[in-house]
Amino acid sequence: MNLIVFSTVLTPRIKYIFNFIFRDILKAEVTFTGNSQFFLESKYAKISYGDAPIAGELFFKSSALLFSNKLEDPKIKTIPFGDYQVPFPVQNSLLPFDVFAASFFILSRYEEYLHQQKTPDDFKASKSYQYKWKILDRPIIDEWALILRNIIRTKYPEFKFYEKHFIQQPTINFDVPVQIPDGFINKSKFLFNALASKENNFISAGFDRLTGLDINIAQVLPVAANHFILKKISPVYFLGFPEIPDDYIGITGISKSLNTATVGLLQPCASEQQKVSNVKAGLSKLKKIFPDLVNLSSQQLEVLKFPLCYLNLLNSGVTSDYSMGYAETPGFRAGTCTPFSWYDLQLEKVTPLNVKSYCFTGAALEQLATQDTNKLMEHFIDSVKVVNGMFVSSWKLRSLSTHLKYKKLNNAFKHMLEYAGS
């Protein structure tokens, strides 16, 4: 049995969010119609979305957001729903709020578009509506989807949803080391070029070696790879490149250690000044190490601005992105732990960019006590397991090393892998 959705007007926003909830999260077949007679005669499970029900179907009262094709600043009102607040309250509906408008508002990062129109400042987690509504720490759209699933099953007990399973996928990032050239003249030329381009990788790497904080990437990678193989986990590795000539980039051992792994580009869009050419330059360096790379992925752990960064990625050929999260604050930035296609609010269309959200970084755990770290990680893992979602976390490669300085993060990483399972 399929699910048929009726609305007098079927906007791109309506189709996008209904498809995401029912197809991507709940794994159900869904069709749309604006023909009331066809809807009434259909043998499918029925949902209508609008001002009033038609005849005995599951009815959800709509608000105005999904019928608009403009980026407007809505007057957000909320009501209590369980132990948190929900937006877009409605009456005479199966739910006391417009769950589809609320989901679209969060998933599309609507408020971040509005934020960028008003100020060039970075968007902080503490400014988000999810933080104010006390839902930032839960995959709220997936939870709402389960409520919708139960509502459908109550009226249509024979309706079948396909099974979805919990997935753990850590992302590991590191900067490709700078290769110091031989000879006094070459070293002097390299140092001059590095300073002239304001490139600090060489200096910081040298400082790390002097202080004993440096890790040997070529040694850590194969150890980490074997660890993931034993756990039957498939991580994604993101590589960052210094802005220096390719001859100075050290790739010894990296391509061999990651020849069967999934790899992507780290920090391709750190600021508004970085254009498509910068992204393409990074991807070009990545493909020199991995010439057979086809599906291009990226992760941005600093500034993620809408829509600039994602437009740059699309124009560079990137098809998958792992940037959706807050580097310093644990939480579900897009309100979900299910991969989704990015919806561009400026063009009002679904794009080919597939987005996977991470819920915390190793950096966000560094200041916590061990007990608090484990408790926080277990909370996020449990939250994702309940909805059979995709649990993505982001770690620096050094967290996987045996260096004494990173022992705490290393232990946290191992605890996460064990608790989450394969």
Image (cartoon, rainbow, N blue to C red):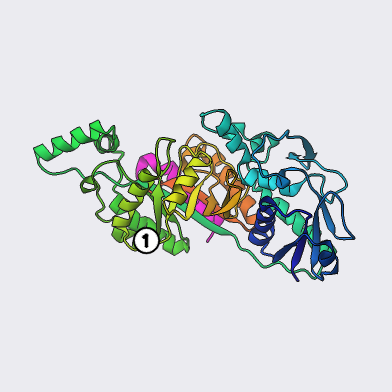
**Place of residue 68 in the rendered image (x, y in percent of width and height, measured from the top left):** 70, 44
**Place of residue 41 in the rendered image (x, y in percent of width and height, measured from the top left):** 85, 69
Is residue 406 within the magenta segment? yes
Is residue 58 within the magenta segment? no
Q: Residue furthest right?
A: 55
Residue interval drawn in magenta: 403-422
The answer to whether 226 appears left or right of 389 in the picture is left
Count of numbered marks? 1
Secondary element type, mark 1? loop
Give the main secondary structure of the magenta stretch. Answer: helix
Location of the N terminus by quadrant is bottom right
For label 1, the residue is: 293
Task: Residue at 78%, 43% (x, y): give it.
Answer: 82
**Place of residue 246 in the rendered image (x, y in percent of width and height, measured from the top left):** 24, 48
Does the image show residue 397? no
Does the image show residue 147? yes
Residue 185 vs residue 203, the one in the foreground: 185
Q: Is residue 273 above or below residue 382?
A: above
Task: Residue at 84%, 55% (x, y): give it.
Answer: 59
Residue 122 vs residue 361, the one in the foreground: 122
Q: Is residue 360 above or below residue 421?
A: above
The residue under label 1 is which amino acid type?
Answer: Leu
Residue 117 vs residue 91, the one in the foreground: 117
Task: Residue at 32%, 45% (x, y): give it.
Answer: 241
